[in-house]
Amino acid sequence: MERNDVFDLSQIESKPVGWIPTGLYTLDYCFSGKVELVIEGGKIITSVKGGVPRGLMSLWAGQAGIGKSRMLIFMSSLINISTRNKILYIQNEVNGTQFKQWVDGFNSQLRNYGQACGHAGWLDAIDTSRFLMSNATDYHRHLEIIEQHRPDLVIVDSVNMLEGFNSSSQIRQMLTSYKNVTSNIDAHTILVGHLAKDGTIKGSTDVPHLVDIVVNLHRDKYIGDDYINIDSLFFLTVGKNRVGPSGEWICVQHTDSGIDIEPGNPSSSLQYKNIKGEFQEEAARLSKQVKGYKQPRKGFLDALGGIMGIGE
């Protein structure tokens, strides 16, 4: 379809949005606003109508050190092991050996996670033949690789590493090219961006306007009058969203073996108890040191457990 032309709607093809389930159903819901599980014999086979949308592009932005790469490597590994979708992860922050070590490190947690949640049909280990990594920094090369390998999920970590990512015209050209190839192969592309201290994306303020979904990763959050900031905990909030709800958010915690956000399994119950204890300790400390700080209102921690989908 050429630009600068006029079409009646009968000439335009309409098709439903396809989804790539992440295996983390609270995360799937954040993007789509709906999750339907296929269950056979008491075991979860897969989720449908939930996940990241095919044919579209998202921006994941957060401050340095919050764990964007770790979160996305974990999510990519989970998608690979649970759905066998092909992953292309583009990064040049670490060498290939270290990147492979990160992926391998999630194997045992993902295997135990699948068994604990009763997931059927999961692989015993990550299929590394369908998990591709590239260290290219030229976006033209990225487009060639995407066209050649036709992955289901593309992650560019980060856009700030791209050659030429320093002017609005170049950024618009790059993102338009990524968007076109993403649509052509019916994949989903995630662009990772770094936040400046003022909360804007480093490089250009145009980036959020050129993508379909904007995801913010941040450590602190107000829930009512209560303020949360815990080192091991961060929040993932979906802001702009062209295919689902906006404003949905989840709690995420880094653990020694991976990422913990999925409700309804033993590790999350432990996660809630750990966070509850840590939050209570932090609240007690702040009430003594910070003038005017108020202790969490009654029921807040139970509400936090409800947000995470779990109880004590």
Image (cartoon, rainbow, N blue to C red):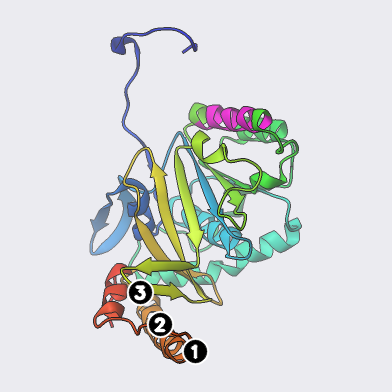
How much space separates mark 2 and mark 3, taking CA atoms? 9 Å
- Picture residue at 36% right of the left edge, 83% below the top: 294
State the mark number for residue 293: 2
Tell me if residue 22 can be seen: no
Question: Residue 174 magenta-drawn?
Answer: yes
Tell me if residue 153 can be seen: yes
How much space separates mark 1 and mark 3, taking CA atoms? 16 Å
- Dot 1: what SS? helix
**Residue of label 1:** 289
Q: What residue type is labelled 2?
A: Tyr
First in sequence: mark 2 vs mark 3: 3
Residue range in magenta is: 170-182
**Residue of label 3:** 226
Residue sitting nearer the eye, 247 or 261: 247
Residue 118 percent across, percent down from the top left: 33, 67
Marks 1 and 3 close (CB-CB < 8 Å) = no
Residue sitting nearer the eye, 236 or 190: 236
- Picture residue at 41% right of the left edge, 44% below the top: 240
- Dot 2: what SS? loop
